[in-house]
Image (cartoon, grey):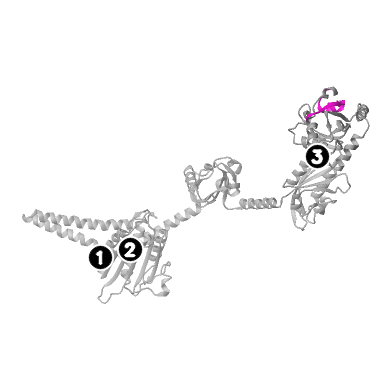
Amino acid sequence: MPESPENSAAANSLQQQPDHLKVGKAILAVLESSNDLVYQITIDPPISLDAPADEQLRSLVYDSRFTYANEAIAQTYGFEKAEDMLGLELIEVMPLDYPSTLPTLRKVVELNYKTTHLESIERALDGSKKIFDNSFTGVAQDGKLHSIVGITHDVTAYRQEQNQERLRLAALDATSEACVIVDAQQTEQPTIYVNESFTKLTGYSFSDIAGQNPRFMQGPETDPHTADQISQAVRQSKKIKTEILNYRKDGTPFWNTLSISPVKDESGATTHFVCIMSDATEQRSAQRALLQKAKILEASHDCIISTDMHWRINSWNAQAEEVYGYRENETIGASIELIIPPAELKAIQSALEKRTSPNASVHFSIANHRKSQEELFVDTRVSLECGQHDTPLGYIICSRDITDKIQSEKNIHSLKSDLAHFARVSIFNELSSSLAHELNQPLAANMGNAQAALRMLENGNADLDEIKEILADIVADNRRAGSIVSRLRSMMKKKFPDHEEFSLNELIQDTLALTKSDLIIKQTQLTLELQDDLPTAFGDKVQIQQVILNLVKNATEAPLPDSNGIAQIKISTRTKPDSTLVCEVSDSGPGIAEEKLEQIFKAFFTTKEDGMGMGLRICKSIIEDHGGAITATNHPQGGSLFTFELPPAHT
């Protein structure tokens, strides 16, 4: 491969110089006592300057040894004296496994063995890497390169410092926090560096802010006291961390969490200030919102308590102190069982485990304990508090004291029960004649049967089979009378509501047994259409029986005779698609005036001259307390139709 004219000219110039070996020795003699790092590398056999570049490179790699080194370079490599370096192969300080070795030596060949400031990475005696800045020249004679004489400088520390500086700047550029560096040695302390995060935060690029101090971002709403604190810290070259209101390039304000640190030189003089900034606007808003929430919690009429995942109390607001009697410092770290009985807490835990959503809350009305051990009733809602990634943190318990409300409800239930009892007594008072007739029938039959049996026995012609039949009739009539008395006692008895599962059809039939005589006396024909396999209901049988009795009694009073002189009452039961039980009581009377339908269930409203207006109001209250509904309409074929619904016992 032909050489370029430039390389050929340089080689000729090198070959034409007189007695290069003598010149080299003279140079080395001059530099012997120099503080510079001086060396000579001899190539044996010499490199032909006419040889191809790859062949010259091969010779330079494998045939080069140190034949001269002054004390300065020997110590830099880690040798005790210069003689220890003599004979050292070039590849021992420039190993081939260093990626930079071959490219650097190839550059030496390309530069015809003469250059300044060529850097090389080399290995010291202890294995550490060194970076040298080389200036050298080749010593050639008769067209062959015999040696290279050079002066080098150890720039390892300098390059490491440069690398560290680059890394620091790269780190500043990569950080999410805004960074500004100002020159403290100039009067105005101008900005000399901003990173990309600063531009994103403020909208200012380096060209916008270069030469200005960052204080120009202060504005009309900036707190002057905070600004003075910053200025004083800068004057005293002290660190400071604070929050200050600054303004972006577009004029919008933001809260800046600002940290300023002085940078000092070896003499202790401040040369620069490094300012780290971050946007605290959202954090400020969140803190303000939390503060507002805390004030709301303290002012709340609800007891608000937080616990950890083990139900240990973390916080306790003022209302909780008032309701439970414990001060906050008495409860922190204590188990929630301090106020919630274990059985109630177990029920809450079970309900929380069955939630369909982690954020769903559970609601209970439960008994708690005050510090005085007095029982109270609270309406409680418990929810799980979660952090980032839905990590469970603890529980929030919101409770409201409903002790007075519960007591009031008990009083109301008691009053309702008393009123319902009074209404039942009133009904039976009105049915007294028919009930007396209903009881007289079995009693009179018993009397007749007993007298007949007695006569048979006195005459001595008693037929035992006939006597047995008479006695069986007496027993049956006695049971009939006892059943009537039992039903009357059940309905007349004053007691607190007792809920149980029951058959609505059977309850209707039991109730009608009490009105049988009344229906006969009033010439009323009763039709029953009771659905088979009707689901059971759940509630107080006596109260539901009272509703049925009231509706039947009203029906016997309302109807007018039909063309045959017979009044008609129809009682039917059925179920809706959702299994709700429906009972309908209709009559053949004139119905209810349209303007009175909306008032029919109001207290003290009546269509009877001697009525109290409480019967249907009590019926409505009873049905609604059982989770049902009652309505009154006019039947399309004439007469009134009362319908009540009850939920099934099992849903």
**Disc 3 versus disc 2: distance between alpha carbons?**
97 Å
Q: What residue appears at the point 83 percent right and 24 percent down from the top-left corner?
A: 86
The residue nearer to you, when weighing 327 against 151, is 151
Residue 352 place in picture, x, y as percent: 50, 47
Q: Nearer the viewer, mark 3 or mark 2?
A: 3
| Numbered mark located on residue 517 in the image | 1
Q: Give the range drawn in magenta.
A: 62-80
**Disc 1 versus disc 3: distance between alpha carbons?**
116 Å
Q: Which residue lies furthest to the bottom in this view?
A: 563
Q: Is residue 128 above or below residue 369?
A: above
Count the numbered circles shown.
3
At label 2, which amino acid type do we have?
Thr
Residue 130 place in picture, x, y as percent: 80, 32
The residue nearer to you, when weighing 55 against 470, is 55
Crowd rating for badge 3 (residues with CA inside 10 Å; few <14, some 14–19, many 20+): few
Q: In this view, does 595 lie to the left or right of 58?
A: left
| Numbered mark located on residue 162 in the image | 3
Q: Which of marks 2 and 1 is in front?
A: 2
Name the residue that disc number 2 marks: 573
Q: In this view, does 386 lie above or below 546?
A: above
At label 1, which amino acid type do we have?
Ser
Label 1 vs 3, first from the N-terminus: 3
Any magenta on residue 79? yes
